[in-house]
Image (cartoon, rainbow, N blue to C red):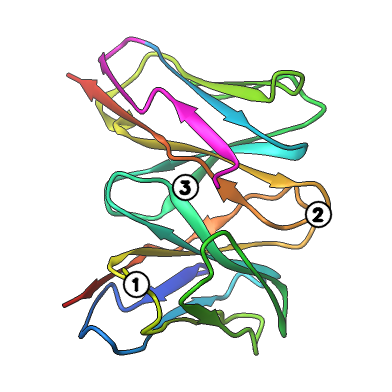
Amino acid sequence: SQQGEEDPQALSIQEGENATMNCSYKTSINNLQWYRQNSGRGLVHLILIRSNEREKHSGRLRVTLDTSKKSSSLLITASRAADTASYFCATGPRNDYKLSFGAGTTVTVRA
Amino acid sequence: DGGITQSPKYLFRKEGQNVTLSCEQNLNHDAMYWYRQDPGQGLRLIYYSQIVNDFQKGDIAEGYSVSREKKESFPLTVTSAQKNPTAFYLCASRPWGGENTEAFFGQGTRLTVV
């Protein structure tokens, strides 16, 4: 079974709006990572947040992590048409290189 | 250029045949992974390897086999035992340095079994 589960499954927003998606996971983690996938391509790493961090920023991306609730959120501010993609969270158990992905959130940004 | 290369990009095979997907990286990464992605779905882990000559089963290893004879190579064989092999296959690698490292992905191989 997948370690991380994203919510919502799909999101459609207007250019300039913010997009928020959530990820829940099941077991203790070292870190949580977010990736982006354009249709039919490989994944690209966006941001990594460690288990002892609560919030992290990178450009227009903001990630939060709540280990007590086993959940994370990814916020994309001032969205652009080029942000249209699928976004996945990934987690791995402590002391292991295993890396498991959720089902993803498909984001469509309308011009 | 450093990177991770999957080949071929598209692969067609007849039902009942084994097929091997190639994954090569020149990033000097220790860990390598294989994932399967079905249309509109997330990534499911097939196998992963942390070092040469060692690998672990992921969540959906049945019907697949791998080898890790060289650090830079992690080929995946889809055997005839895999009931529904048509899918998009992604290979990834990660550097040594603990678990707090990002994964780098290839561009994928789309396998169609006819």
How far is the residue under mark 3 from the one under mark 1? 30 Å
- Along the horizontal axis of the image, is A18 left or right of A12? right
Which disc is residue B98 wearing? 2
- Secondary structure at badge 1 equals loop
Q: Nearer the viewer, mark 3 or mark 1?
A: 1
Three-letter amino acid code of the residue under disc 3 = Val
> Disc 1 designates what residue?
B83
The reply to whether the C-beta atoms of the residues labelled 3 and 2 are less than 8 Å apart is: no
Question: The numbered mark 2 sits on a residue in which chain?
Answer: B
Against A10, is A42 above or below? below
**Horizontal relation, residue B14 to residue A67: left or right:** left
- Mark 2: which amino acid? Gly
Q: Residue at x 63, y 33 (%)?
A: A25
What's drawn in magenta, residue-wise?
A: A1-17
Foreground disc of the pair 2, 1: 1
Given residues B77 and B68, the one toward you in this image is B77
Q: Amino acid at mark 1?
A: Lys
Q: Position of residue A5 (x, y in %)?
A: 51, 33
For the C terminus of chain A, the quadrant is top left
The image position of residue B92, as x and y in percent, is: 53, 63
Residue B65 covered by magenta stretch: no
The residue under the point 55% across, 45% down is A2
Callout count: 3
Q: Chain of mark 1?
A: B
Query: For the residues marked 2 and 1, what is the alpha-carbon distance in whole angstroms?
Result: 35 Å
Q: Chain of mark 3?
A: A
Residue labelled with disc 3: A44
